[in-house]
Amino acid sequence: MRQETPSQTVGPFYAIGLTREPMNVMARDETEGQKIRIEGQVFDGDGAAIPDVMVEIWQANAYGRYHHPDDTQEKPLDPTFSGWGRSATDEKCFYSFETIKPGSVPGNDGTVQAPHINLCIFARGMLVHAFTRIYFADEPDNESDPVLQSVKSKARRKTLIATRAEHDGKVIYRFDIHLQGENETVFFDM
């Protein structure tokens, strides 16, 4: 007799897998560059904050060089900064990173990309990860960034921009991620 196997979803297990030392503190005192905090929430199509999400980021250092063997630019490599981190959402559904503001990196065909941070979102029920970018609201190079400008709708382009605030002398960028719905974040095929 044949029986159907019940459907399965991914997770919830991200918080369980991230109970070791924090992976969201990327910048130390000796790390070069402007120290920043990135924080936000991940929302579903109904606008509800989602628990048990993992956000992974990778970025260039303050000079615009990735800590990766394929990045052979002659820009300095900061040995105290790997450019990679992970954060699970907390009990209030927030993720956060203590990092530095990255420098500009080369694009295709001799273009220059504005400072940005690459994100990958893992969540319950998502069998395919979502990839996006964070750009900074106070960055003038956004106007010429080829990837950001490839998003034709200005309203949609705004979903890639983190807003800046200061609290107790620290620079904080807020970046909320909307997986679906009216304010859906722009995602990229990787």
Image (cartoon, rainbow, N blue to C red):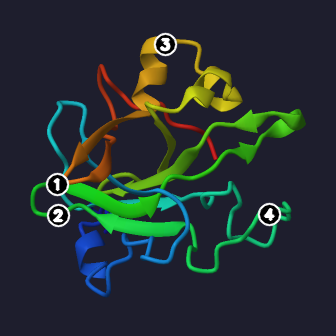
Q: 139 or 127: nearer the eye?
A: 139
Is mark 1 in CB contact (under 8 Å) with mark 2? yes
Q: 135 or 16: nearer the eye?
A: 135
Which is closer to the viewer, label 1 or label 3? 3
Label 2: which residue?
A: 90
Q: Which mark is residue 93?
A: 1
Mark 2 or mark 3, which has the lower sequence index?
2
On the question of residue 153 being in view, the answer is yes
- As measured in the structure, the alpha-carbon distance from the residue carrying label 3 to the one carrying label 4 is 31 Å
Q: Tell me what residue is drawn at x 64 percent, y 80 percent.
A: 79
Q: Amino acid at mark 1?
A: Cys
Is mark 3 in CB contact (under 8 Å) with mark 4? no
Query: Residue 60 is drawn in which quadrant?
Result: bottom right
- As measured in the structure, the alpha-carbon distance from the residue carrying label 1 to the one carrying label 3 is 28 Å
Label 3: which residue?
A: 154
Is mark 4 in CB contact (under 8 Å) with mark 2? no
Element type at mark 3:
helix
Mark 4 or mark 2, which has the lower sequence index?
4
Is mark 1 in CB contact (under 8 Å) with mark 4? no
Label 4: which residue?
A: 71
- As measured in the structure, the alpha-carbon distance from the residue carrying label 4 to the one carrying label 2 is 33 Å
Relative to 86, residue 162 above or below: above
Q: Residue furthest front?
A: 169
- As measured in the structure, the alpha-carbon distance from the residue carrying label 1 to the one carrying label 2 is 5 Å
Q: Amino acid at mark 4?
A: Asp
Element type at mark 1:
loop
Relative to 151, residue 19 above or below: below
Indicate the position of residue 109 as horizontal and vertical percent values.
89, 34
